[in-house]
Amino acid sequence: MISTAQLEAVAQVANTEGHEIAAIRGRHRGPTLIIVGGIHGNEPAGVLAAQRVLPRLQEMRHELRGEIVLLRGNTRALKSKARYIDADLNRQWTSENVRLSDSGDGPEKSELLEQGELLMVLKEVVRRARGEIYFLDLHTTSAEGKPFATVGDTLRNRRFALTFPVTIVLGLEEQIDGTLLEYINNLGAITLGFE
């Protein structure tokens, strides 16, 4: 259970530090793991988890092969503790919206600004990757039940998901358009969503 003080700390950090929580790069080549928490502003658990694990990851830097990048999704909505400001950021990753965000020609919607900022960060991470790219999208469920993972139904994604001790739900991604997970998967990364 996340306390009110922890939620307030997440909101403050989201407001003052932008999307990147940290990038921990090892000395040796290896895969890149991108972890995004808080794509919905009312789901801060992924951001909080990243902040909690960061000191340990920094201690392990010299043993690390590749890079781990920890990101905040919707910083403005996290600050407001709202799911979104103008539109659901996790439904904005269509080719048209990405084009508008990337070009800066889109309407002045908060989530298109967030998307443009995230695109810049993600492009830089992908550019400097020295191996396979893995992507985790951390959510906070509000429903009763056990945590579960969702993946685009590819063999690579399934293999990755099976390394986690959690139920895997297939087909959910086919019901929801414009998710960040789908966008990153279509770029060729190995992806996993976690609820």
Image: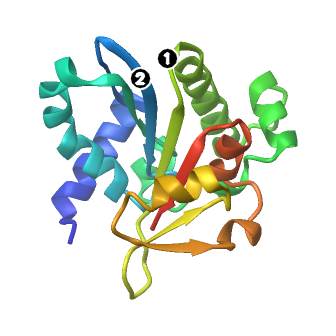
Tell me: residue 74, above or below residue 163: above
Location of residue 110 by image quarter: top right
Tell me: residue 22, above or below residue 185: above
Q: Position of residue 89 (x, y in %)?
A: 64, 51
How many C-alpha atoms fall within 10 Å of the one at disc 2: few (<14), some, or many (≥20)? some
Q: Horizontally, is 30 left or right of 8 in the view?
A: right
Given residues 139 and 160, the one toward you in this image is 160
Q: Secondary structure at mark 2?
A: strand
Tell me: residue 126, above or below residue 6: above
Location of residue 171 by image quarter: bottom right
Which label is found at residue 60? none
Question: Does the CB distance between marks 1 and 2 fall below 8 Å?
Answer: yes
Given residues 93 and 164, the one toward you in this image is 164
Q: Specify the amino acid type for callout 1.
A: Arg
Q: Secondary structure at mark 1?
A: loop
Which label is found at residue 130? 1
The CA span between labels 1 and 2 is 6 Å
How many C-alpha atoms fall within 10 Å of the one at disc 1: few (<14), some, or many (≥20)? some
Q: Which residue is mark 2?
A: 30
Q: Quadrant of the N terminus?
A: bottom left
Q: Position of residue 82 (x, y in %)?
A: 48, 61
First of labels 1, 2 by sequence position: 2
Q: Horizontally, is 46 left or right of 171 in the view?
A: left
Q: Is residue 188 visible?
A: yes
Q: Horizontally, is 71 left or right of 112 in the view?
A: left
Q: Quadrant of the C terminus?
A: bottom left
Q: Residue at x 52, y 14 (%)?
A: 128
Q: Position of residue 105 (x, y in %)?
A: 84, 27
Q: Residue at x 41, y 23 (%)?
A: 30
